[in-house]
Amino acid sequence: MKNQDQLTETGGTFGSRSNFLLVMIMILGVFVAILNETLLNVALSKIMNDFGITPSTAQWLTTGYLLVIGVLIPVTAFLIQRFTTRSLFLGAMTLFTVGTLVAAISPGIEVLIFGRLLQAAGTGLLFPLLTNVVFSIVPFEKRGSAMGTIGVVITFAPAIGPTLSGIIVEHFSWRVLFYGVLPIALIVIIFAYAKLKNVTETTNPKVDLFSLLLSTLGFGGIVYGFSSSGEANGGWMSNHVLLPIAIGTVSLIVFTWRQLTIAQPLLDLRTFKYSIFRMSTVIMMIVMMSMFSAMMLLPIFLQNALSYSPFEAGLIMLPGGIVMGIMSPITGRLFDKFGAKWLALIGLGLIAITLWQFASITLTTPYITIMIFNTLLMLGISMVMMPIMTNALNELPPPLYPHGTAIITTLQQVAGAIGTALLVSIMTNSSTRYLENTSMKEDNATLQILAMIAGMKSAFFLAFGLVAFAWIISLFIKRSVPQDHTKMEVDQGPAN
């Protein structure tokens, strides 16, 4: 009888029970970590009241989280090659757990943000590691199903976050959001210490410190500049906005040049020689911008403009989260059978339609209507995210898997941070212009609500335009075909 650990791909999607256990342990850790990306969205109003801060300051709890992830993920390709699966996963989960404790006991907004940054440092390592492990152990023809299984976590976790947060914040302090996650994170660490094995090959690559500095200044500067637009005097024309964006842009240009000229790049940008990878990356960035901005803007709008409770604002997200969890493995199997193009066209179409509907919300829009819109939005996202990512990585030769994963995840998180900051800024600035230009004789509270509605319209119209552009790009997506890796050196680039 064959040993269960030696089964081939005929033994299931992951090949063996030990591989399945490995992936499940990592999935649980990633689920807890990614859940925290949106867990605070519904709680932001109470945190703002407790600490006496503005929405522009509160957004750093989300934007700062994404910023750290965007800065750290470029290093993951190096770390995955340098350290074992086991040590890297345990280190990432430990960072996340320490950050969760710091956030739970934080006496002020500064410490709370610091705790979130520590959480992000762990989260930034987990998803690229999980994706690389899956591509190392799963055969090509079953990767859609495998990534669909992962997608249950990747899409369901951020979608269910607002619902869970709303239930908790309605009855308890927002600190319970962190205290509740803490024991789960500790259990994952204990279980991983006992059962997790190594599956990726380690080498001894050298890290280019100059590239690391350029990456940090580049991604960090751009996200910081966008995030400061809502706080700075002078708005977009303020030096607090323009200077970081300029530094970030120049740093990324130099970073790109250096990655293409050194022997061991921090991120191997030759992945962009592959056309499907290029187009897929742009699509995923736009979807991430739309998803995270909607997940942040909608709960604030529901509570502050429509006067829904945190529980009601969170509950409105629940059907969408359930749909994402159900659809992810289904879309994975559909991808294995039909490819990514039609899934992307239908999914992006649904996203565009719902963003247009969100831009049309008024004070009289029924609760159930908003819930249906959000459910359709999540359905569209579930049809796009994992199929497009799998299709992009399938085109790469195996030596580029860690770099391709790191690049996609970096740009996704940075896009999420930029999208959140940009749309919050647009909402804030549009609301301010509405108040300055209005001639209505309403009471102050009513005017504030009407101004917020005007700001929301502007933000969601922009998101709609971006998704419409992504839909056009998806028309040119083809089903990726694995390169003949036995005959092709990575240095030669694609054989297209």
Image (cartoon, grey):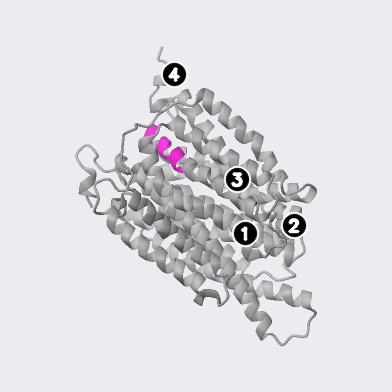
The residue shown at (39%, 40%) is: 79
Q: Are marks 3 and 4 in contact (CB under 8 Å)?
A: no
Q: Residue at x 52, y 74 (%)?
A: 236
Q: Nearer the viewer, residue 57 or 16?
A: 57
Give the answer, above or below, for where 389 lies relative to 80. below
Q: Nearer the viewer, mark 4 or mark 1?
A: 1
Q: Which residue bears the numbered disc 2? A: 50
Q: Residues within 10 Å of mark 4 (few under 14, many from 20)?
A: few
Q: Is residue 321 left or right of residue 142?
A: right
Discs 3, 2 touching: Cβ within 8 Å: no
Q: Residue at x 63, y 46 (%)?
A: 322
Give the class, few, some or many, for how many residues have Cα within 10 Å of label 1's Cα (few <14, many ≥20): many
Tell me: 294 left or right of 315.
Answer: left
Q: Position of residue 168 (x, y in %)?
A: 74, 46
Q: Secondary structure at mark 1?
A: helix
The stretch of residues the image draws in magenta is 128-138
Q: CA distance from mark 3 to mark 4?
A: 33 Å
Residue 4 is tagged as 4
Q: Amino acid at mark 4?
A: Gln
Residue beneath disc 3: 35
Q: Circle 2 sits in a helix, a strand or a loop, which is it?
A: helix
At label 1, the amino acid type is Met
Residue nearest the viewer, comparing 135 with 139: 135
Please tell me which of labels 1 and 3 falls first in the chain: 3
Instruction: Name the foreground residue: 12 vs 263.
Output: 263
Q: CA distance from mark 1 to mark 2?
A: 19 Å
**Quick one: label 4 or label 1, which is nearer the N terminus?**
4
Q: Secondary structure at mark 3?
A: helix
